[in-house]
């Protein structure tokens, strides 16, 4: 009987020590996962990777932008998934944002930041400039996945000495219209 009490006391002691060791262990990582999105009345879904994206335009020489010059084009795309073309077969894209105020910058996206004297031009897959707020030419869709190809370049002000070096950003929203 005495041995049973000793074994029980020893077992209880081990359980208490193990419990306190476990309680003393700090969290080894935790976090939150938030899922966001929207359900749209559209024949295609926009892939998560291209619904909100950053297009790095690189380091552009101010000399290349003088007197209305332009940078090289940087391609980007909007990817559409699971398209069904039973009733709708084309899509247009309209880019919306702050208009550029540079001389010779009609339809360009404005830039913000330290850099001045330039605007961002957006082109379709054929290299044709898409004016801000104006729909792109219609692109034919096919069932399944589709990519809408675009490019962007920086265009300088046509006024002499208007280009000021520095970092910039330009933010455009896009709207798809299916027909």
Image (cartoon, rainbow, N blue to C red):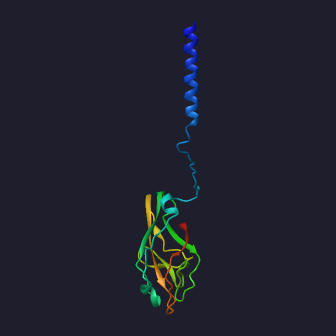
Q: Position of residue 139 (x, y in %)?
A: 46, 69
Q: Residue furthest top?
A: 1
Q: Nearer the viewer, residue 171 or 25?
A: 25
Q: Is residue 61 left or right of residue 175?
A: left
Residue at 58 percent across and 17 percent down: it is: 9
Q: Residue furthest bottom?
A: 160
Q: What is the total number of numbered labels drawn onto the structure image?
A: 0
Q: Quick check: 130 above or below 87? A: below
Q: Nearer the viewer, residue 54 or 86?
A: 54
Location of the N terminus (image quadrant): top right
Q: Position of residue 168 (x, y in %)?
A: 52, 76
Q: Quick check: 145 above or below 140? A: above
Q: Is residue 178 left or right of residue 61?
A: right
Residue at 55 percent across and 28 percent down: it is: 18
Q: Position of residue 76 (x, y in %)?
A: 44, 69
Residue 146: quarter of image: bottom left
Residue 85 shows in the view: no
Residue at 54 percent across and 9 percent down: it is: 3
Q: Nearer the viewer, residue 96 or 45?
A: 96
């Amino acid at each position: 009987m005495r041995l049973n009490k000793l074994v029980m006391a020893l077992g209880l002691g081990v359980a208490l020590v193990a419990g306190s060791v476990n309680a003393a262990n700090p969290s080894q990582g935790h976090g939150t996962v938030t899922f966001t999105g929207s359900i749209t009345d559209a024949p295609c879904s926009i892939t998560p990777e291209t619904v909100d994206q950053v297009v790095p335009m690189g380091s552009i020489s101010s000399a290349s932008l003088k007197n209305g010059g332009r940078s090289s084009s940087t391609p980007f795309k909007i990817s559409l998934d699971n398209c069904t073309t039973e009733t709708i077969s084309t899509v247009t894209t309209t880019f919306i944002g702050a208009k550029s105020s540079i001389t010779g910058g009609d339809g360009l996206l404005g830039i913000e930041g330290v850099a001045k004297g330039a605007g961002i031009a957006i082109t379709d897959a054929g290299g044709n400039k898409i004016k801000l707020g104006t729909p792109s030419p219609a692109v034919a869709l096919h069932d399944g996945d589709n990519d809408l190809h675009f490019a962007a370049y920086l265009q300088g002000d046509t006024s002499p000495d208007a280009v000021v070096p520095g970092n910039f950003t330009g933010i455009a929203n896009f709207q798809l219209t299916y027909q």
